[in-house]
Image: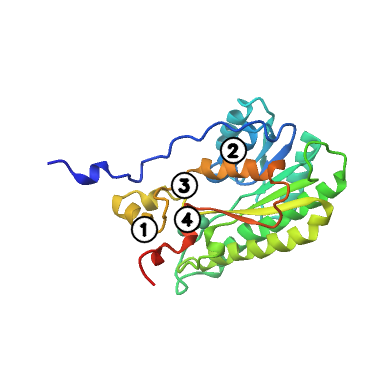
Amino acid sequence: MTDPAANRAGPQTKAPALPRLPNLLAGQKALVTGANSGIGKAVALALAEAGADVGINYVVKPEEAEEVATAARAFGVNARIYQADVSQEAQVLTMFSSFVADFGALDILVANAGLQRDASIAKMTLDEWNKVISVNLTGQFLCARAAIAQFRAQGDTRSVSRARGKIIDMSSVHQMIPWAGHVNYATSKGGIMMMMQSLAQECAPDRIRINSIAPGAIRTPINHDAWATQDAYDKLMALIPYGRIGEPEDIGKVAAWLCSDYCDYIVGATLFVDGGMTLFPGFATNG
Ligand code: BGC
């Protein structure tokens, strides 16, 4: 007898690759934080595929960042790597001035760098709380502040886009869905939502477009182990109406499109890219 589980979609079942992006971002200069792996890597490659020159920020593992740069160059754009811990003000300022010295301008920031340090409230240390808040939230503040200063300094000297500059903040479904055992992470993402909206309101008059993407469960090296068994995968699927894990590319391609002039009138929005996770699927047959 065949095992019925053998035909079920499982943790290893990848969605097919998406179609190639058109040249949406030709001539634009984009910096992506946390771009050596996972979602950040996919974003950097999608921006490159859409014609942008890319800066690839990383903290550790320069060899991974170099690989992303090589893959980006295969799209015919320039790519360079930048080491900086986004929670450190001096390192962020140095990264932005190096980027502008190298590329001559900045058109796009994707503030993606983020991490998790999970623990129940009984066990969470102050260090775990501070680490997540300082990388995920303060890091996005520091990078946004530096990008906005550069966009304002450039004024109308750039002719590559209708907006003077674009920022995408990488949030999470957990800016909206509370997450027991992850209070530091959920708080950082809730903070990103209000930071993004407040900055979008403040900077829109300068024609600076600031928005967020809120991914759901995405297949990254960090998440992979958590869903490795069929049982864990099936539990996850109960939370995702669309019935599959997201691929990093699902986020990358949306980021490229959101930075393009097709989205020129999208300001201060959070785009949930989550297969319906935020639709409260528990209520589909209940409530
Ligand atoms: C987290 C993942 C989690 C997903 C859905 C993301 O923001 O980084 O670890 O699986 O949200 O809960």
Q: Residues within 10 Å of mark 4 (few under 14, many from 20)?
A: some
Pointer 1 residue: 238
Indicate the quadrant containing the C terminus: top left, top right, bottom left or bottom right.
bottom left
Mark 3 residue crowding within 10 angstroms, few (<14) / some (14–19) / many (20+): many
Find the distance from the CA under tag 2 to the CA under tag 3: 26 Å
Foreground mark, 1 or 2? 1
Q: Is mark 4 within 8 Å of ligand 1?
A: no
Give me the C-alpha separation between circle 1 and circle 2: 37 Å
Q: What quarter of the picture does the N terminus occupy? A: top left
Residue drawn at x 66%, y 25% as measured from the top left: 76
Measure the C-alpha gap from mark 3 to mark 1: 14 Å
Q: Secondary structure at mark 4?
A: loop
All told, the count of numbered labels is 4
The residue under label 2 is which amino acid type?
Answer: Pro
Query: What residue does disc 4 label?
Result: 276
Kind of residue sitting beneath label 4: Gly
Residue picked out by circle 3: 246
